[in-house]
Structures are given as C-alpha cells and as structure tokens.
Amino acid sequence: MFTIILYCAAGGLLVLSFFKSREKTKKALKKAWKSFENILPQFLTVLLIIGMMLAVLDEGTISKLLGTESGVLGMGIAAVIGSVTLIPGFVAFPLAASLLKAGAGYGQITMFVTTLMMVGVVTLPVESKYFGRKATLRRNLFALIYAVCISFVIGGVLE
C-alpha cells in the first residue's frame, strides 16, 4: 500500500511540475531516461547472473555455503565474494534478499554486502593511483575489519 502511495505522489508531483514548467519537466524526464538507459545493461547483467546462480545453486547448497551453520568459513566466502565483486548497491540489496530467502545467514549476508560496498579489490589500482598505495591499503583493511565486526554483531543479534 505504501508503494502505491509513493507512486501516486510521484505522479502527482510530475503533473504539477509539468504544469509549472513544461520545458524543465521534459528536460528532467529526458535526463532520467538517459540515466535509466545507462543503468539498464548493468542491471540486466546482474539479474541474469542472480537468476543463473539461484537456478544452479539450490537452497541446500546456499545454506551450506552461506547459511548460519557455515560459521567463519561462510563469513570468509562471503567476504571474498563481496571484496572482488563490483555490483552497484541497487542490485546488491535485492541479491542479498534473494540469498536470505534461499537460506543464507544474516551474518554472512552482512559480510557480503559490507565488503561489496566498502572493500574494493577490483578498484584497487585506480584508487591507488589517486590516493596512494598506503592510504588505499589502509582504507581497505579498516573496511574489512569493520565488515568483520558488524557481521558478527548482526549475526549474533539476528540469528
């Protein structure tokens, strides 16, 4: 119900904007469409990967690798996958929800999402170029330490 209210409010404000300034509204809609076109290939690729992964890995396998019982090994697997994967946040959270529904543990998913957002193995060369190697390694190390700490807290509280 809340979603419907938000869509109605957005639609109403769009109509109001259109009546206030047609040119600005058209320009904003064109920019929004361009942004959507730029995001769409990444989004579809990730959805395809998620779909294939969930089709290949059954709930038992996901639960075994990333479930509550997987413990520190599951946290390590989630940390490695999250650290080396480059996925935008708007795709990471639905993926995390899908993995939770498939049997993954809260601590492991927290580790995955936190390392995905904060630890950047793939972006290390670019980050090193701009911030220096020492600062980059230090930032990634602290991000990993934070991910471990928050994962154990979330895993302990919710599981």
Image (tube, helix red, strand yellow):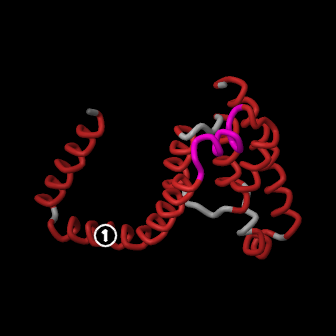
Residue lying at 67% horizontally and 48% vertically, measured from the top left: 112
Specify whether 43 is left or right of 30: right
List x then y, in percent, for residue 139.
80, 56
From the image, which quarter does the N terminus lie in?
A: top left
Q: Answer whether residue 62 is magenta in the image.
A: yes
Q: Answer whether residue 125 is magenta in the image.
A: no
Residue lying at 57% horizontally and 56% vertically, measured from the top left: 56
Specify whether 135 is left or right of 21: right
From the image, which quarter does the C terminus lie in?
A: top right
Report the residue that reaches farthest toward the left: 19
Q: Amino acid at mark 1?
A: Trp
List x then y, in percent, for residue 153.
73, 29
Q: Nearer the viewer, residue 119 or 42?
A: 42
Q: Which residues are magenta?
A: 57-68
Q: Main secondary structure of the magenta part?
A: helix
Q: Nearer the viewer, residue 77 or 14?
A: 77
Q: Nearer the viewer, residue 94 or 98?
A: 98
Residue carrying label 1: 33
Count every numbered label the image shows and give the total.
Answer: 1
**Helix, strand or loop under label 1:** helix
Residue lying at 75% horizontally and 42% vertically, measured from the top left: 74
